Image: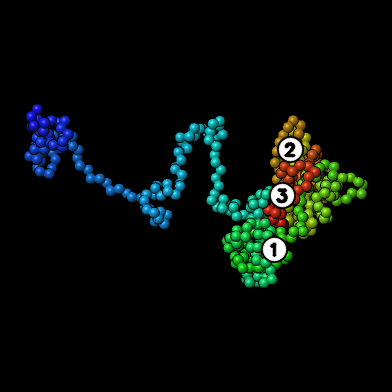
Amino acid sequence: MTQAGRQGSPRNSSGRTSAGQQSARTQGAGGAGRGQRDFSKGGVDRPFKRPKPREEAFVDPDLNPGGGAPEQADRKAGAKPARKPAARKPGAGKAPGTPGALKPKPRIGAGAAKATGSSAFGSERFGQNLGPVRKPTRKRGPRGPVPQSELHDADGVRLQKVMASAGVASRRVCEEMIAEGRVEVDGQVVTELGVRVDPKTAVIHVDGLRIQLDENMVYMVFNKPKGVVSTMEDPDGRPCISDFVRNHHGERLFHVGRLDVATEGLLLLTNDGELANRLTHPSYEVPKTYLVQVRGPFPQGVGAQLKAGIELEDGIASVDSFKLVDSTPGHVLIEVVLHSGKNRIVRRLFDAVGFPVLRLVRVKVGPIGLGDQRQGSIRNLGKQEVGHLLASVGL
C-alpha cells in the first residue's frame, strides 16, 4: 500500500486526518462558514446547549473548618450513612399490629433525654422512678421575692455540697442544676453557686422534689397480709405490725392510716410525725387506690352511683374513680380510687349498693404503690419516692 493509502485508512492510529473527514470539514467550511457547524443535514453533531450553572451547597466554616464538601466532612467526622427508607424494609406495607408488621419505635424528645441524665437521684438503684412531681392544689398567698443574700449562711455548707451529700447527683451536676434555676431553698430559687445553707434547717427542692437531709428519718412500705392487726401492739396477742418490723429497724414507727384485719395491702411506716399527720388529714385529699373483688355479674350504672355519692350513716360518701379490671364467672375485680379516710369506707359503700366485698387490697397511697412487693415484706422507700411523697402533701 502506498503512503497516501496509509494516510487515508480509517484504521490509521497515528492521529492523521482521513480523506472522508477532510471532505466533511471542507463542506462544513464552505456551506456554513468558518467556525460554524451545519446541522441541517442531520449529521452526528447535536445542537450546542449552554450548561446550567451548578448550585453549590453552602458550607458553614464553623461546622466544616477543613473545607471540602459537607458529605466529605461528615465522613471525616465519622457520621453514619443515611439509612434506607422504611418502605424498602419487609413488613413496611402491613398495618400496625398484624404479624410481620414493623414495630413502632418510641419517640423520646431531646429535652426529655437531657432531663433524664441530670434528674435528681437519677442514679439511684432502689425505689421506683415516679416521674415529674405533682404538687397539691392548695391556695397560698403570694410570696414576694427574697434576696439570696438572706438565704446565705456564712457558717453553713455550700449548697452544691449539701445536694451531693444527699445523693442528688455529683457536685458538678448539682452546680449545673443551681445555675439553671432548678433548685429552691426555703421556697426561693437560687442561682448563685456561692450560697451556703444550714443542712439542719434548710428546705431544699430540686425540680419540685423535696430533699430529705435528716438521715434519722425512716420511710417504709409494708404489704400487710390478711389477719394482721394495724397496730404496733395488740393486747389479745394477735399478729401486728411490730412482728414484721422488729427485725428491720429498732426505732419506733408510726403507721399511716389503718387497714382492718381482713383487708390487705399497703401501709406506710415512718417516724416523720408531720408527714403522717398530713397524709391522714382530710384537707390534703391524698388519693388511695383499692382493688375490690365482689360477686358477679356487676350491673351497669352501679359505678356511676358510687361516683355520684351514697348516703351512709355518717354522711354522703363517694369514690373518685371506678374501673372494671377483670371479670370471671361469678367474680368481678374493680379498681376504685377515693380520698376519704373514714373507717371501713370501701366495704360500707359496696354493702350499700348490694355487693358485699369478698376481698379488698390497697395497692397505692398517693404516689407510692406496692408494685410486685410480696405480702408480709417491708422495704425502704427510695429517696426519689420520699421526695414525691413529701411534695404530695406540700412539704
Figure coloring: rainbow
Amino acid under label 3? Ile
Q: Quadrant of the C terminus?
A: bottom right
Label drawn at residue 368: 3
Q: Nearer the viewer, residue 280 or 109?
A: 109
Residue at the right extreme?
236
Residue 349 appears anywhere in the view: no
Q: Position of residue 284 (x, y in %)?
A: 73, 56
Q: Residue at horizontal 45%, vertical 47%?
A: 78
- Select label 1 or label 3 by which is in front: 1
Q: Position of residue 229 (x, y in %)?
A: 85, 46
Determine crowd level at label 1: few under 14, some 14-19, many 20+ residues with C-alpha closer than 10 A: some
Considering only order in the chain, which callout, 1 or 2, is on the residue closer to the N terminus?
A: 1
Q: Quadrant of the N terminus?
A: top left
Label drawn at residue 298: none
Amino acid under label 2? Leu
Tell me whether the residue at label 2 lies in contact with that at label 1, contact meaning CB atoms closer than 8 angstroms: no
Q: Residue at horizontal 25%, vertical 45%?
A: 51
Tag 3 secondary structure: strand
Considering only order in the chain, which callout, 3 or 2, is on the residue closer to the N terminus?
A: 2
Instruction: Give the residue number, with chain letter if any, for mark 1.
Output: 203
Distance of label 2 from label 1 (alpha carbons): 42 Å
> As displayed, is residue 58 above or below residue 373?
below
Q: Nearer the viewer, residue 284 or 198?
A: 198
Q: Residue at horizontal 69%, vertical 55%?
A: 387
User: Is 179 displayed left or right of 24 in the figure?
Assistant: right
User: Is 393 displayed left or right of 50 in the figure?
Assistant: right
Instruction: Give the residue number, with chain letter if any, for mark 2.
Output: 333
Distance of label 1 from label 3 (alpha carbons): 22 Å
Q: Position of residue 369 (x, y in %)?
A: 72, 47
